[in-house]
Amino acid sequence: MMAIARAGQRIEGCGNFCHIGRRRNQPMATMNVSLPDPMRDFVQNRIDSGQYASASDYVRDLIRRDQSETEDEQRWLRELDASIELGLEDEKAGRLYDLGEVCAEIRAEIEGMAGEQPLQ
């Protein structure tokens, strides 16, 4: 059974609240999307199960998720750039360590704590 409701209305069997429709004063545009039959059937099954009110609701949710993932990726790239910049600043200031020496020190510390034979 497919439930149809107006924006902001509660739908029985849909939990505490369903986000349906649009935000106030937000203009809506219309788009036509062509899908192969298996994809159309998948979307219709999501609607019939009550997870979405309409195909438009489903597509809006996918777009919101994609927007969020894109924002997360952009934030991660900005943080990576900042980390690289910090590393370059450390290099210019002479705050670098030889990886081999650091690993040797860590191995020696672990071996000392464990009282075992040298790690190989």
Image (tube, rainbow, N blue to C red):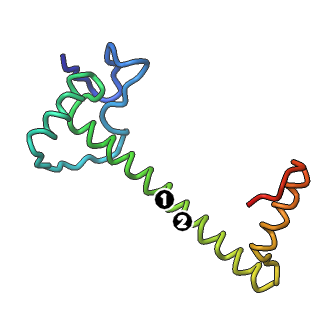
Q: Quadrant of the N terminus?
A: top left
As measured in the structure, the alpha-carbon distance from the residue carrying label 2 to the one carrying label 1 is 6 Å
Q: Give residue 48's mark.
A: none
Is 106 displayed left or right of 29 in the figure? right
Image spot of residue 26 (x, y percent): 34, 45
Of helix, strand and loop, which one carries label 1? helix
Task: Name the kind of residue labelled 2 in the image.
Answer: Leu
Circles 2 and 1: CB atoms closer than 8 Å: yes
Which residue in the protein does label 2 denote?
A: 77
How many other residues sit within 10 Å of disc 1, few (<14), some (14-19) or many (≥20)? few
Q: Give residue 73's mark.
A: 1
Image spot of residue 20 (x, y percent): 32, 31
Based on the displayed image, in which of its 4 quarters is residue 25 positioned? top left
Of helix, strand and loop, which one carries label 2? helix
Task: Name the kind of residue labelled 1 in the image.
Answer: Glu
Residue placed at 64% from the left, 74% from the top?
84
Image spot of residue 101 (x, y percent): 81, 73
How many other residues sit within 10 Å of disc 2, few (<14), some (14-19) or many (≥20)? few
Q: Is residue 27 positioned above or below 102 on the image?
A: above
Residue placed at 77% from the left, 58% from the top?
119
Is 69 displayed left or right of 75 in the figure? left
